[in-house]
Image: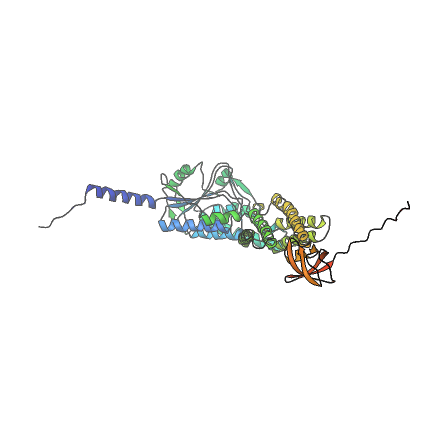
Amino acid sequence: MVKIVLPSRRWLHGLALLFVFCLSASAQVLKIVINDTIHPITDEYIGRALTTAAQNKYRAVLIELNTPGGLLDSTRDIMEKILASTVPVIVYVTPSGSRAGSAGFFILQAADVAAMAPGTNTGAAHPVTLGGGKIDDVMKQKIENDSAALLRSVVSKRGRNAGIAETAVRESKSFTDQEALSQKLIDYVATNEDDLFKQIDAHPIKRFNGQTITLKLSGEPILPYDMTLKQKILAFIMDPNIAFILLAIGALALYAEFNHPGAVLPGTVGIVFILLAAFALNLLPTRFAALAMIVGAFVLFALEAKFVSHGVLTIGGIVLLTLGALMLVDAPIPEMRVHLLTALAVSIPFGFITAFLMSIALKARRNKVVTGAQGLVGELGIAQSALAPQGKVFVHGELWDAVSSTNLPAGASVVVRSVEGLQLRVDPVTVPQTAQTPAHAS
């Protein structure tokens, strides 16, 4: 007789809960928040989120965006990742008062669903040359045409208004949320995530590959997706102001290590800070001429300690350091450059501190040595025995073997001229003769 064991109700309930959990997990919406300029770390963060969403088969990726713009290369890379994503991407400019300026406008238009919160704006996507320098008309037209073509190729596939979108590139036009909606630059204006998802539920979505899908996201759990610790640190130092401060502190720490060899801590701090600054500047559009100006500022600070210029060299170093800081990062938007306040706040104290420390170091090197064998030269002593010419002398609380240039009796005062091993070379102390007072006749 074969005995069949049926699963208990507890097992059945457990399997049912596991099945429901798996369904809910696969139906999650992954949310990332971009509240920064667009740079390589932003690109890496968005790319990692899209990969995670595809691997876990999430229903959609929600990107909440607030940016003044950023680097064009990073923007293009982000657009490529969004367009190639197997998971639908929703870009939502929020909260109220936020913007998707310049590079943010391109990212907004690349999304499967483009939405804005009330009181937000987008546009002003005219390409800007690095550093804001003036370029010839031919090159300007080439850059504009390239950016406009990129935008048209994306916007037309999304079913939005390519002609109006192009004016944001060629005429630097900006649009409020209602203007963008009425001119078909975005799909929805929503007050919050729930409102956005309800509106998405009611309309089909046209993907970049031409496929039309329908998303039902109302009530779906939203999973926040944060940057890793590495990405948070790198995003922090990608701020040009932070990179410049790290560079200045690192240089000052290395200077302290050179003047106090073996201290270890200043040297370690200096190397770490300079390497962090170098990493950030390597990812940012950096002017090497500005780095040369910063190095020149340190040279002027060093010369101030060596030559008496009454502060002229220090002032020159401060001016050079400030200009080098302002031109250090050749970025297309002001938010990605070193601010004037930061440059002055670092350059002025740094200039005076460096010049002061260098002057102290040079004065210390010029002072007479007062320790070791060289510290005995010029010291006075007493002959403890007759010097004929060798004998014993008492100098600095110690008894030394000595050789005198002339024979001297015990108790004579001597001066040390040199130290040869454990023997001193001494000379007699010459006492100036005082004028004798003539005797008065009684």
88, 37: nearer the viewer: 37
- Residue 368 x %, y %: 68, 54
Residue 312 appearing in the image: yes
Q: Is residue 381 left or right of residue 131?
A: right
Q: Is residue 66 left or right of residue 338?
A: left
Give the quarter of the image for residue 369. bottom right
Q: Is residue 329 left or right of residue 161?
A: right
190, 427: nearer the viewer: 427
Q: Is residue 224 above or below residue 423?
A: above
Q: Residue furthest front?
A: 442
Q: Residue furthest right?
A: 441
247, 415: nearer the viewer: 415
**Residue at image x 30%, y 45%?**
22
31, 119: nearer the viewer: 31
Q: Quadrant of the C terminus?
A: top right
Residue 211 appearing in the image: no
- Residue 402 x %, y %: 68, 61
- Residue 46 x %, y %: 45, 49
**Residue at image x 61%, y 46%?**
346
Q: Is residue 368 above or below residue 18?
A: below
Q: Is residue 176 left or right of residue 133?
A: left
State how many labels appear: 0
**Residue at image x 33%, y 45%?**
25
Identify the colour scheme used: rainbow
